[in-house]
Image (cartoon, rainbow, N blue to C red):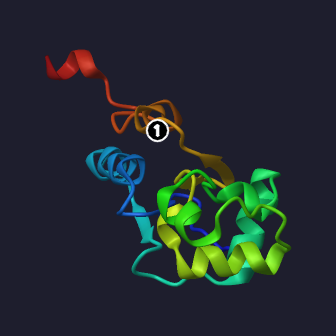
Amino acid sequence: MISTDKNMIKLYYSSKSSIGEQTYSYLNASFKDILAIDITKTNVTGSQWKDIAEHLDVNIGDLVDTDHPDFTKTYGDTTNLDENGWIKILDNNPEVLVYPVVIIEDKYTQIKNPSDIEKKLEPNSKGIDEKKYI
């Protein structure tokens, strides 16, 4: 199980993906506590991938972009792998992660559009009387 501080936002992303980079930028600009895990630089264990897939209610293979040029160049139209096969693909080619995964308060979400992250975040000014500062 992936442990997270309830107030910390955890992001699994590939810095080689424009969606991943943009999602990271949105989160970074939010001034929230973020644990950003760039899977191209940090190894994610098979157990962590299993946990992520389980929480997203998808198969591990669904985390892989089978249309990504690096995937098709190496694996062709292979899509009948077992769980360990998909984990090896993510280990060896992390850039093929289909979408960044964000974890906010134990809710796991794949971010398909970077601006969608804004809808998931509570405003930082929660509890501030805005009229007082105008």
Place of residue 64 in the rendered image (x, y in percent of width and height, measured from the top left):
64, 59
Residue at horizontal 79%, vertical 81%? 84
Q: What element carries label 1?
A: helix
Q: 67 or 117, which lies in front?
A: 67
In the picture, measured across the screen, residue 51 lies left or right of residue 28, that is: right
Place of residue 26 in the rendered image (x, y in percent of width and height, measured from the top left):
33, 44
In the picture, measured across the screen, residue 82 lies left or right of residue 74, that is: right
Q: 72 or 109, which lies in front?
A: 72
Place of residue 104 in the rendered image (x, y in percent of width and height, measured from the top left):
58, 51
In the picture, measured across the screen, residue 3 lies left or right of residue 61, that is: left
Residue at horizontal 42%, vertical 75%? 40
Crowd band around label 1 with a 10 angstrom C-alpha radius: few (<14), some (14–19), many (20+): some
In what quadrant of the picture does the N terminus appear? bottom right
Q: 54 or 105, which lies in front?
A: 54
User: Mark 1 = which residue?
Assistant: 117
Instruction: Tally the numbered discs.
Output: 1
| Occupied quadrant, residue 85 | bottom right
131 up-or-down from 62: above or below: above
70 up-or-down from 126: above or below: below
31 up-or-down from 3: above or below: above
115 up-or-down from 65: above or below: above
Residue 61 visible at all: yes
